[in-house]
Image: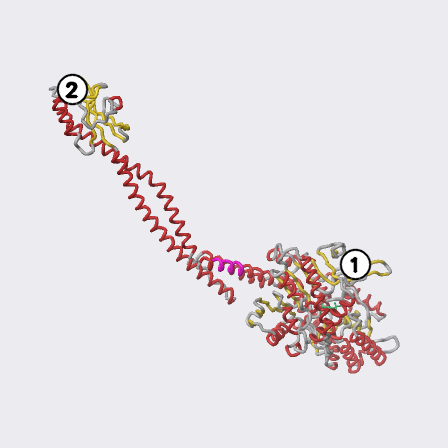
């Protein structure tokens, strides 16, 4: 309403200014018109009386002239009449102003009109040449002009009233039109808001839509088009494509990655400071992404020389030699690591989520430490953020509470959390004493990602079961505490082509080198398994399958060796130590039972292998086994496929690893079924090369297309779409606020 009054007021003001500008012209026009009228009357007087005057002058009848002049002067407008003989005024009528003299009248051979001031009023003096008795004088007719001024003032009043009426009418008309436009504009904005809320596609272009509503629709249309373009561009993800997508979609945005494990660990050894790249799927996936995006990676500084290699702000530029992003290290005390990392994360959440039949341990003291360490990382993220709206990529089960903590301190941040391990069904998750707090923490994210749709569904079930929220099943979105979190599957992957492949020798050379190193004859068939020494990986189960193979197919004795690379991990925990002991004992037992002089079917290599060594092993192998009892994705499976540019080799893959959803051409096995897995070993060892190639080609296409740049790209582009939507929502909310203030 205020707006309408304002517009009406503006229209009235404009009309008023126009009146002020027009009024003097109108008044002067009326005055000129009145003067011309008076001049006409003077001429009439002269032409009517001229002959009579000349006649009376010839007769020198001054009495009659006086009478004639007085009679003419009775005309209401004529003030006085006289005759100027040179400078002498003759026969002046009785109203002739005393101050008037012939010198004041402009005289010439033709009629003249001039205005003089006499007796405090304007007087028009008309002088007409008149010849009598051989001499030329001038008849002067004086008109009182004060009535012209009266008429001018009157006209001014009338014109003013008329124009004021028109102005008010115009203001009312403008206000009515504005009211009409405003109503349509509001209806259009409301419609746009409803569309955004309902997630329905924008309305098609219509010329009828008022401009602002149309603009909102256009932005939504653009958003929709962006989504279609991005969805279509799923085949060619590379560092350049990711960089291009980021500079288009998130240009000027600040990216901060947070994880427990750091991508580069500096250790003090006898040879000085050495650099270690940890055996971590998370690091393998995120490192190339962070290299492509730049930004900051916040992680626990766990190396023995980490403190010596940072600056005063605990930062170090990485990768060493070719720095492209900043690693910000966070220091944890031993007590903190025990409670947060070993306790809550790896004795609680890890077994809870993996369901590998290792009982989770939930200690309240661990949870308090977990909370405190999450808060410590929140401090580091806030300290590193240069803007109030960074894109923060929170990684994994170590930081379930971090998204909420960041959200509280940086409300405009776009927080994308990725849970790298499985999410169990709601019933299993329900045993966790911290379930509500974990869900609350994760729902501080803008987007929460899992490897598979099944994990997303499990999470939504848990939300439904344990917290008060609204779940939109169609959009897989949760509204909790007024904020929305999108739940999405993003299958993680590896870089393509993998950096570790670059320096590799030919497959034949790798086969020869590895066999020589392991003390095997050149023709020995070789299987490999490469992972951290973790009970979720099914290392014991695959050994049992090898036992079955060698029992059921004894012809493989002496002709097949399985090399198990196992990097020690979390050795502080009893479960992990026991696993290692059990695996070593089982390997010894199998080697005793199936081995012969100079032949051991299982080679257990318990140490961390750098990526180059891992890839050499993959290239040297005839088969690779990934027999996880439960795994979010498992990147070893994808790395094996990526390493085999000769398109040979067979992958034996657990049905319970997320990777089995994508790598369907592997031999899919149930790791709990040792007999069936033994069969799979035999099938792999006897698979014709043509079939190996067919399967490997399809798997390589899959890993190439769905590489880690696509994984990150899809998450970051989803974040960008969200930021755009939030921007639109803010614009709409603001225009709504303004509109309701006006209304
Ligand atoms: O599977 C999730 C994951 O974070 C992997 O990315 C990584 O290999 C592992 O767990 C973590 O290992 P660590 O405890 O040694 O960092």
Please tell me how many numbered marks the rendered image carries: 2
Residue in the foreground of this view, choosing between 425 and 150: 150
Residue 713 in magenta stretch:
no
Say which quarter of the image contains residue 113.
top left
Q: Magenta segment, which residues?
A: 728-738
Seen at 23% across and 34% down, the residue is 37
The residue pinned by badge 2 equals: 132
Ligand 1: give its quadrant. Answer: bottom right
Structure colour scheme:
secondary structure
The residue pinned by badge 1 equals: 307
Which class describes the residues within 10 Å of circle 2: few (<14), some (14-19), or many (20+)?
A: some
Whole-percent x and y of residue 649? 73, 70
Left or right: 136 as drawn, with respect to 652: left
**Residue 544 - label:** none
Residue 222 against residue 673 in the figure, above or below: above
Whole-percent x and y of residue 526? 79, 72
Seen at 76% across and 54% down, the residue is 311
Which residue ends up furthest to the top in the rendered image? 134
Which image quadrant: the N terminus?
A: bottom left
Please report whichever mark, 2 or 1, sits nearer to the chain's N-terminal start: 2
């Amino acid at each position: 309403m205020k707006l309408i009054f304002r517009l009406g007021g503006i229209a009235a003001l404009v009309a008023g200014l126009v009146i002020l500008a027009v009024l003097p012209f109108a008044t002067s026009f009326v005055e000129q018109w009145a003067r011309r009228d008076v001049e006409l009357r003077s001429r009439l007087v002269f032409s009517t009386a001229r002959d009579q005057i000349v006649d009376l002058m010839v007769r020198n009848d001054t009495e009659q002239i006086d009478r004639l002049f007085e009679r003419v002067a009775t005309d209401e407008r004529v003030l006085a009449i006289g005759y100027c003989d040179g400078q002498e005024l003759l026969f002046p009528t009785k109203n002739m102003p005393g101050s008037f003299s012939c010198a004041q009248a402009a005289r010439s051979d033709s009629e003249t009109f001039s205005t003089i001031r006499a007796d405090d009023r304007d007087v028009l003096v008309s002088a007409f040449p008149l010849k009598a008795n051989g001499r030329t004088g001038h008849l002067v007719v004086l008109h009182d002009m004060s009535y012209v001024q009266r008429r001018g003032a009157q006209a001014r009043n009338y014109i003013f009233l008329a124009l004021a009426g028109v102005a008010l009418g115009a203001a009312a008309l403008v206000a009515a039109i504005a009211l009409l436009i405003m109503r349509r504009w509001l209806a259009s904005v409301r419609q746009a808001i409803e569309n955004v809320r309902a997630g329905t596609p924008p309305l098609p272009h219509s010329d009828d839509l008022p401009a602002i509503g149309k603009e909102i629709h256009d932005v939504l249309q653009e958003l929709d088009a962006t989504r279609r373009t991005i969805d279509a561009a799923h085949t060619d993800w590379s560092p350049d494509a990711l960089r291009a997508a980021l500079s288009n979609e998130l240009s000027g945005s600040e990216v901060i990655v947070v994880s427990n494990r750091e991508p580069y660990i500096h250790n003090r050894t006898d040879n000085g400071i050495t650099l270690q790249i940890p055996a971590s799927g998370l690091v393998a996936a995120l490192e190339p992404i962070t290299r492509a995006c730049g930004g900051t990676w916040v992680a626990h500084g766990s190396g023995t020389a980490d403190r010596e290699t940072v600056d005063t702000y605990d930062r170090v530029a990485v990768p060493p030699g070719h720095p492209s992003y900043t690693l910000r290290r966070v220091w944890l005390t031993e007590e903190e690591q025990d409670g947060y990392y070993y306790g809550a994360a790896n004795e609680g959440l890890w077994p809870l989520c993996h369901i590998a039949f290792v009982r989770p341990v939930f200690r309240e003291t661990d949870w308090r430490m977990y909370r405190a360490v999450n808060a410590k990382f929140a401090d580091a993220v806030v300290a590193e953020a240069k803007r109030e709206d960074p894109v923060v990529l929170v990684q994994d089960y170590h930081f379930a509470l971090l998204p909420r903590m960041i959200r509280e301190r940086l409300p405009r941040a776009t927080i994308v959390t990725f849970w790298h391990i499985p999410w169990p069904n709601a019933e299993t998750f329900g045993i966790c004493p911290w379930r509500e707090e974990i869900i609350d923490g994760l729902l501080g994210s803008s987007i929460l990602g899992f490897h598979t749709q099944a994990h997303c569904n499990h999470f939504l079930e848990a939300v439904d079961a344990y917290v008060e929220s609204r779940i939109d099943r169609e959009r897989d979105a949760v509204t909790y505490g007024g904020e929305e979190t999108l739940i999405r599957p993003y299958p993680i992957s590896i870089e393509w082509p993998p950096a570790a492949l670059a320096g590799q020798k030919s497959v034949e050379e790798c086969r020869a080198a590895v066999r020589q190193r392991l003390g095997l004859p050149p023709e020995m068939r070789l299987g490999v398994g490469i992972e951290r020494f973790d009970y979720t990986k099914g290392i014991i189960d695959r050994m049992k399958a090898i036992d079955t193979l060698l029992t059921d197919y004894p012809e493989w004795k002496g002709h097949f060796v399985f090399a198990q690379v196992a990097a020690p991990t979390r050795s502080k925990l009893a479960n992990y130590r026991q696993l290692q002991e059990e695996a070593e004992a089982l390997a010894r037992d199998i080697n005793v039972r199936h081995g012969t002089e100079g032949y051991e079917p299982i080679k257990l290599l318990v140490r961390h292998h750098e990526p180059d060594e891992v890839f050499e092993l993959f290239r040297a192998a005839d088969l690779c086994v990934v027999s996880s009892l439960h795994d979010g994705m498992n990147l070893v499976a994808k790395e094996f496929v990526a390493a085999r540019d000769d398109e040979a080799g067979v992958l034996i893959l657990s049905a319970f690893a997320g990777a089995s959803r994508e790598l369907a051409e592997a031999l899919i096995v149930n790791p709990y079924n040792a007999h069936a897995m033994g069969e799979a070993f035999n099938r792999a060892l006897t698979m014709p090369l043509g079939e190996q190639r067919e399967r490997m080609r399809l798997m390589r296409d899959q890993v190439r297309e769905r590489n880690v740049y696509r994984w990150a790209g899809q998450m970051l582009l989803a974040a960008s779409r969200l930021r755009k939507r939030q921007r639109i929502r803010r614009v709409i909310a603001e225009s709504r606020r303004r509109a309701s203030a006006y209304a």
